[in-house]
Image (cartoon, rainbow, N blue to C red):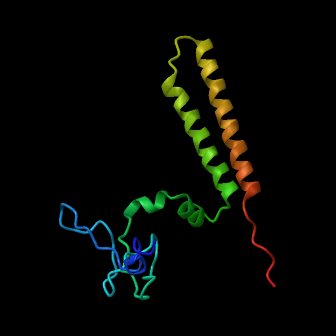
Amino acid sequence: MSEVVHNAQHEFWRPPAAQPSAAGSNLVEVCDSCGTEFMVGAHFCHACGATRQALPNRGWTRYLEFHSIKQGLGLSTASLVAFLLGLACALAALACGFIYSERNVLEWQAVQIYRVQWLLAAVAAFVGGLLLRKRPGPEK
């Protein structure tokens, strides 16, 4: 049995060989000093401790991340969800006029009732967001 895995320990600790892609660049990021593959999301090499090069800037898409919006507005998670729900209801109230076409006064009144319902839902969501926001604690 020992003949089958005679070099297993040596092979296990060998750094992975970087495979070049068709474009000539590596798909796998490796450490510049020791050649070991970086762990996912690591800022340092787990083998030698060298720092990883800075990750590329993600551009404007980072502003669409839930966590970034939450930090930027200073809201709790529940409050932000209620705020986004309120925005969706307000947009639905505006969209009622574009979606429905009124041919008489009765249809116009029905569309206005839809708008009022969507606006009431938006107000309820905004009030819920205000009630759920985090309040600053007392200073010690």
Q: Is residue 70 above or below residue 39?
A: above
Q: Is residue 21 above or below residue 105?
A: below
Q: Quadrant of residue 135?
A: bottom right
Q: Nearer the viewer, residue 81 or 52?
A: 52
**What residue is at 53 percent from the left and 64 percent from the top?**
68
Q: Is residue 105 above or below residue 15?
A: above
Please tell me how many numbered marks the rendered image carries: 0
Q: Quadrant of the C terminus?
A: bottom right
**What residue is at 59 percent from the left and 45 percent from the top?**
87
Q: Position of residue 65 (x, y in %)?
A: 51, 59
Q: Position of residue 134 (x, y in %)?
A: 73, 64
**What residue is at 68 percent from the left and 31 percent from the top?**
117
Q: Nearer the viewer, residue 62 or 51?
A: 51
**What residue is at 43 percent from the left and 85 percent from the top?**
47
Q: Is residue 122 left or right of residue 14?
A: right
Q: Is residue 23 left or right of residue 29?
A: left
Q: Position of residue 39 (x, y in %)?
A: 44, 73
Q: Nearer the viewer, residue 106 or 90?
A: 90
Q: Is residue 20 left or right of residue 110?
A: left
Q: Position of residue 43 (x, y in %)?
A: 45, 79
